[in-house]
Amino acid sequence: MIVMKFGGSSVADAGRIARVTGIVRGRLARRPLVVVSALRGVTDDLLALAREALDGNLSRLDPLAERHRRTAGELGVDAKPLEPLFEELRALARGIALLQELTPRTLDRAASFGERLSARLIAAAFCKAGMPARAVDAFAAGLVTDDRFGGAAPLPEADEELRRAFAAIRELPVVTGYVGRTRAGEITTLGRNGSDYSATILGAALSAEEIEIWSDTDGIMTADPRLVPAARPLEVLSFAEACELAYYGGKVLHPHTLVPAMRKDIPVRVLNTFKPEHPGTRILAHPAKSAGGGILKSIAFKRHQLIVSASSPRMISGPGFLARIFAAFARHEIDVDMVATSEVSVSATTGSERHVERLAAELAPEFAVDVERGQAVICAVGDGIQSRPGVAADVFAAVGAAGVNVRMISQGASKNNVAFVVDDDAVEAAVRALHERFFPHAGPELQRP
Ligand code: ASP
Ligand code: MG
């Protein structure tokens, strides 16, 4: 069997759902399990609805229901099976308004309606097209997670439970992405864009031959095409490269997506719903050397990062400073991305504004602490970067020639990337300069200047 996951833009409206129906029909012989996102924009809407409900404002409810009813109408399927979900959502929103309280748990429950609605619509569309299908809520089919609402991770027992549940389903399953449930049965979400992750969790549990992620680009690109018009799709990437890209802000995949696929060594393919004949990007454990082209594969970036620096002259002689600093990061649940140290100071980047001030206050008695906002991490990825001399020099020469000031550098922790920090405003210039240097227009195999 294979897993086919369709993102929000692939299922934005009836026309696109019809397109998806055609793509799935072409793969029936491979026994697909389909994973779907909410219709485009619906998750944002649901989260806004939940927040506005705190002020007693429920004005998003009707338009949201209407959009799904209209889509059902355009697909020629019955909207009645959706009505209980609209009712449940209304009750939830009223509850929020009444209690004047919105917990992460309630927010996840609200967000779950997008995928629950889209799975039902899409399964109905498949049935109408003569492909017997069944909508499956992942939380009812054993996708058990921890209870970190808003960013839950699957628990080991999920594999077995999912296998058992899907063994009993004869029709083509259309499964909700993004959502799971705790052991106690509360609905969780895997974090924004989490449907990719759902797809690989399911693929690994059910030992899929391949996992297809259908999106709206021709695969993974050499850079974000909105910044770099000359960016082009990559034929193949290793798991390690793709992980690094997802982690450093490559928009195509959720950062945890590849972990389950790597565990079971299942190839992942990123494809374009609007150009189904395009081969997209294959992600494999060990792509053949010749397939990948040059030394750099892609350039990713994350904006709106913070640099937290802590320094103390006493660090020169005293042991344990780093441990104390990072223990404080851990206590405040602040994810650290990049770290640079000197004799007397440590700088770390993070994407989370939350708790940073508390962290700074905690460190302040012992260290001089500085928090800088408006930073961006840029990451150039390619297996073997470290074994090729001169790559880092070329990277920084290109960035320097573009007049961009580099704040922090990290190379070495991971074998396949060079990462550095610049001002948010400089991202465009830096990424363009790097792309021009490493991906000249000469042709797909010629990437070195
Ligand atoms: N619908 C969810 C979101 O918008 C999950 C996904 O699309 O992957 O974040
Ligand atoms: Mg996505």
Image (spheres, rainbow, N blue to C red):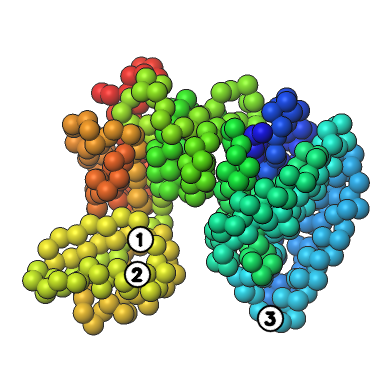
Crowd tier of the residue under label 2, counting other residues whose Cα lies within 10 Å: few below 14, some 14–19, many 20 or above: many
Residues under numbered marks 1 and 3 in contact, where contact means CB atoms less than 8 Å apart? no
Q: Earlier in the sequence, mark 1 or mark 3?
A: 3
In front here: 8 or 332? 332
For mark 1, give the secondary structure.
Answer: loop
Looking at the picture, how far across and down is residue 260, in whole percent? 52, 46
Question: Dot 2 lies on which element?
Answer: helix
In x, y percent, where is residue 18?
78, 33
Q: Is residue 40 visible?
A: no
- Of the residues shown, which amino acid type is indicated by label 3? Gln
At a point 36% along the width and 23% down the height, the residue shown is: 289
How far is disc 2 from disc 3 in space, using C-alphas?
Answer: 31 Å
Residue beneath disc 3: 100
Residue at 18 percent across and 32 percent down: it is 390
**Residue 199 image-quadrant placement:** top right
SS at mark 3? Answer: loop
Question: Badge 1 is on which residue?
Answer: 336
| Three-letter amino acid code at the position of disc 1 | Val
Q: Is residue 319 left or right of residue 169?
A: left
**Residue under circle 2?**
329
In the rendered image, residue 111, in percent from the top left (x then y), is placed at: 67, 60
- Disc 1 from disc 3: Cα separation: 34 Å
Q: Do the residues bearing badges 2 and 3 touch, measured as CB atoms within 8 Å?
A: no
